[in-house]
Amino acid sequence: MTRRKAIEVITSQLQENAVVISTTGHVSRLLFVVDDQPRNFYMQGSMGHAVSIGLGIAVNRPACKVVVLDGDGAVIMHMGALSTVGHHKPKNLVHVVLDNESYESTGGQSTSSGTTDLVDVAHAAGYSSVFNVRDERALRKAMESVLTQQIGPSFIRVLVSRGSELENLPRIPEKYSVADTRRIFMEFLESE
């Protein structure tokens, strides 16, 4: 499955009041193309911090589903954040890691996710439910499970292919400045 297809599957299942935090690089750029919404916070320039932001929102907005779209390289960079999520155990947090085993945004260097079982790490860190999916059907089923039940924090590792869909992706600042992204997202949160 491509990263784009995974994002399409995920966003198609979200209710209107769900919040989406996306990691820097191609994940945010693909979310921007696939489903640009005021509920999306596009992380720009801070690799590895998406789940920490998602955790803060989940703890402070327990009635709202918070979905973090992350990458394997970003998770590996700040793996300690998984322990913090497991400690706080927000039932409304869904942490999706789109794992292509590479730092594709910076040139395609390999990550260590091929030798580090991120599902086992999330489980050991205290996530309540963990899923390892490789195809669209399994992703739909995992998302349905975590979105309809209060079983979080949930971790879904989605194995995705490396890149051909990445050519000519628009950059978010072509439409929104970083300040605009923050303002639009904060306005969405305040309206909920």
Image (tube, grey):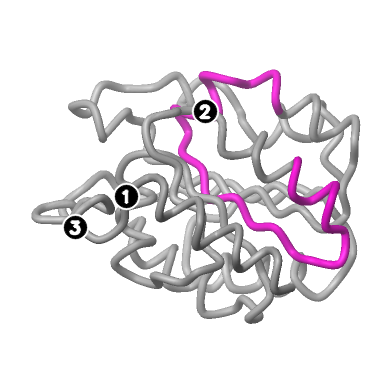
Q: Is residue 74 magenta?
A: yes
Q: Nearer the viewer, mark 3 or mark 2?
A: 2
SS under mark 3: helix
The residue under label 3 is 165
Q: Nearer the viewer, mark 3 or mark 1?
A: 1
The residue under label 2 is 48
Q: Quadrant of the N terminus?
A: bottom left
Q: CA distance from mark 3 to mark 1?
A: 24 Å
Q: Foreground: 48 or 53?
A: 53
The type of residue carrying mark 2 is: Gly
Residue 49 located left or right of residue 167: right
Q: Nearer the viewer, mark 2 or mark 1?
A: 1
SS under mark 1: loop
Q: Foreground: 139 or 78?
A: 78
Q: Quadrant of the C terminus?
A: bottom right
Q: Where, by quadrant of the figure, is residue 180 drawn?
A: bottom left
Q: CA distance from mark 3 to mark 2?
A: 22 Å
Q: Is residue 55 magenta?
A: no
The type of residue carrying mark 3 is: Glu
The type of residue carrying mark 1 is: Ser
Residue 23 located left or right of residue 30: right
The residue under label 1 is 177
Q: Residues within 10 Å of mark 3 (few under 14, many from 20)?
A: some
Residue 45: x %, y % from top left: 37, 31
Residue ID at (60%, 58%): 186
Range of the magenta residues?
56-81
Q: Residues within 10 Å of mark 1 (few under 14, many from 20)?
A: few
> Given contact means CB atoms under 8 Å apart, are the residues at marks 3 and 1 in contact?
no
Residue 190: x %, y % from top left: 70, 65
Residue ID at (56%, 31%): 49
